[in-house]
Image (cartoon, coloured by chain):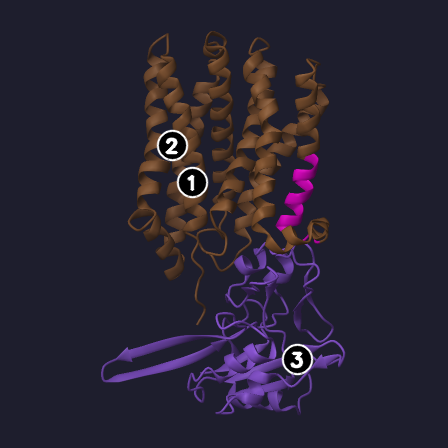
Chain colours: A brown, B purple
């Protein structure tokens, strides 16, 4: 495929930035005591997105050599990439202001935070539509990818924020009981969406079937089964369910689960980008 | 204004690659770069078999996916229906390559810009300058001209052979194949 690992990294960190921001919003709304978790989410969101934008620019070589051409990205509103540029522009500005306010120890106005939340959801979703506008690639050109990427963005961002928040203040982190059931619901949803993606792609001709074969039995099978499914979904779900039964959770288990979600979230983008196979129209 | 298109008769094509090489020369492309590539199709079971060489290049779609996804407007369709790339606007994001269902776009190694067949469009002439793939074809498998002129060679040939775009009406392509 023409798009490689750099685009996969971008799709992952852009989604994780959105998820981090939304997690911080939820925490600030529901758990005023969860200071470290909130700060982590709000500060890391623009940093993650900046890393992603760097990847995009490095991948677009002609633009890299003539940086002024990147201004043209605003030019064609019929292109999902241009729409994404609008979304990133709004979200990045809001996320930066929020991060600065957080660093200065000032309150973030609720209205501004909500604008950021809407931007974050759009950011997570557009990455699915970006791949979806390629009518020659059955694995991408379907309606499952946007919700799958949104769900994975939320879990990835939540995991990154949880890891940092828990590292700084585990006692406070344990009080945020709502994060665990949210993760369980999202992880189950993600499994269903991945199944739907495979079923739909496999029914879309030779290219779709080849994509599914690459993922399930071919060169990407280890990354898919061990990485995305095992480490990213089943292991964290198992740890979550185990922790829900006891009143106290083990910090090491929690860290393992969250790390697994992050690794799985990246690998999901990586295998979806890598398994894109173009139809041959003859 | 004319609306340019092409007919390719794969029954005449021998797969000699002369069109690809002529195009590489005219557009100063490297040996691995090409606006024309070939697909080979085998069909039937022994002993009733046939093979077909199918030259592929930009189909100059009226409903061009590459033009729709190009964020900078570098890819555009000119007044004669020819799909062109403004190299000074292209950032090399490769979205057009991902979107093109015919896989006929390529990255120019030196500039990082995406390029493809332009029907030998010449801005100074304001029209196509004798497309080299057509001129060089040893089998006369290619016919080029104005689709809107019912008396043009290409319009007559398409009508006579009932030539069709390779993917039907998927993108309103302007290269018609006889197979």
The image position of residue A251, as x and y in percent, is: 39, 14
Image side of residue A70 versus residue A152, left or right: right
Can residue A203 be seen from the camera position used here?
A: no
Do marks 2 and 3 share a chain?
no
> Decide: marks 1, 2 in contact (CB < 8 A)?
yes
Which residue lies under the disc numbered 3?
B4
Q: Nearer the viewer, residue B85 or B21?
A: B21
The image position of residue A140, as x and y in percent, is: 48, 51
Residue at the image point whose x is 26% and y is 85% from the top: B48
Do marks 3 and 1 share a chain?
no
Which chain contains the residue that carries disc 3?
Answer: B
The image position of residue A154, as x and y in percent, is: 51, 30
- Between disc 1 and disc 2, whose residue precedes? 2
Which residue lies under the disc numbered 2?
A232
Give the Cα distance between marks 3 and 1: 44 Å
Residue A208: quadrant of the picture: bottom left
State whether residue A172 is above or below residue A228: above
Which residue lies under the disc numbered 1?
A268
State whether residue A112 is above or below residue B125: above
Q: For residue A59: magenta? A: no
Residue at the image point whose x is 36% and y is 25% from the top: A237
């Amino acid at each position: 495929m023409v798009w490689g690992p750099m685009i996969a990294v971008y799709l992952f960190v852009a989604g994780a930035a959105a998820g981090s921001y939304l997690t911080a919003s939820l925490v600030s709304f529901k758990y005023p005591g969860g200071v470290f978790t909130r700060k982590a989410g709000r500060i890391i969101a623009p940093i993650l997105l900046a890393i992603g934008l760097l990847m995009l620019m490095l991948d677009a070589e002609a633009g890299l050599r003539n940086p002024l051409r990147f201004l043209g990205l605003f030019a064609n509103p019929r292109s999902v990439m241009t729409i994404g540029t609008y979304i990133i522009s709004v979200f990045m500005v809001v996320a930066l202001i929020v991060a600065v306010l957080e660093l200065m120890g000032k309150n973030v106005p609720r209205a501004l935070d909500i604008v950021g939340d809407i931007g974050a959801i759009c950011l997570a979703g557009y990455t699915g539509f970006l791949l979806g506008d390629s009518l020659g690639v059955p694995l991408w050109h379907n309606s499952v990818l946007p919700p799958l990427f949104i769900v994975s963005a939320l879990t990835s961002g939540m995991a990154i924020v949880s890891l940092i928040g828990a590292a700084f203040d585990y006692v406070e982190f344990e009080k945020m009981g709502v994060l665990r059931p949210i993760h369980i619901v999202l992880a189950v949803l993600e499994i269903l969406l991945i199944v739907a993606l495979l079923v739909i792609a496999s029914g879309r001709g030779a290219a779709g079937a080849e994509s599914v074969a690459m993922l399930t039995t071919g060169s990407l099978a280890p990354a898919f089964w061990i990485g995305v499914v095992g480490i990213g979904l089943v292991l964290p779900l198992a740890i979550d369910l185990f922790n829900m039964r006891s009143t106290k959770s083990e910090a090491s288990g929690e860290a393992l689960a969250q790390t697994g979600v992050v690794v799985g979230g990246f690998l999901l983008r990586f295998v979806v980008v890598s398994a894109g196979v173009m139809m041959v129209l003859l | 204004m004319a609306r340019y298109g092409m007919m390719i008769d794969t029954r005449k094509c021998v797969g000699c690659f002369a069109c690809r090489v002529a195009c590489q020369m005219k557009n100063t492309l490297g040996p691995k770069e090409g606006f024309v590539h070939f697909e080979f199709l085998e069909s039937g079971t022994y002993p009733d078999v046939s093979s077909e060489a199918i030259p592929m290049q930009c189909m100059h779609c009226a409903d061009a996916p590459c033009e729709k996804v190009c964020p900078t407007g570098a890819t555009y369709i000119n007044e004669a229906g020819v799909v062109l790339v403004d190299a000074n606007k292209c950032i090399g994001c490769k979205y057009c390559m991902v979107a093109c269902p015919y896989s006929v776009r390529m990255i120019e190694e030196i500039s990082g810009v995406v390029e493809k067949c332009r029907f030998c469009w010449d801005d100074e002439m304001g029209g196509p300058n004798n497309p080299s793939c057509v001129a060089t074809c040893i089998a006369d498998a290619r016919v080029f001209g104005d689709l809107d002129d019912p008396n043009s060679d290409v319009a007559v040939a398409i009508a006579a052979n009932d030539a069709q775009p390779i993917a039907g009406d998927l993108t309103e392509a302007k290269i018609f194949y006889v197979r």
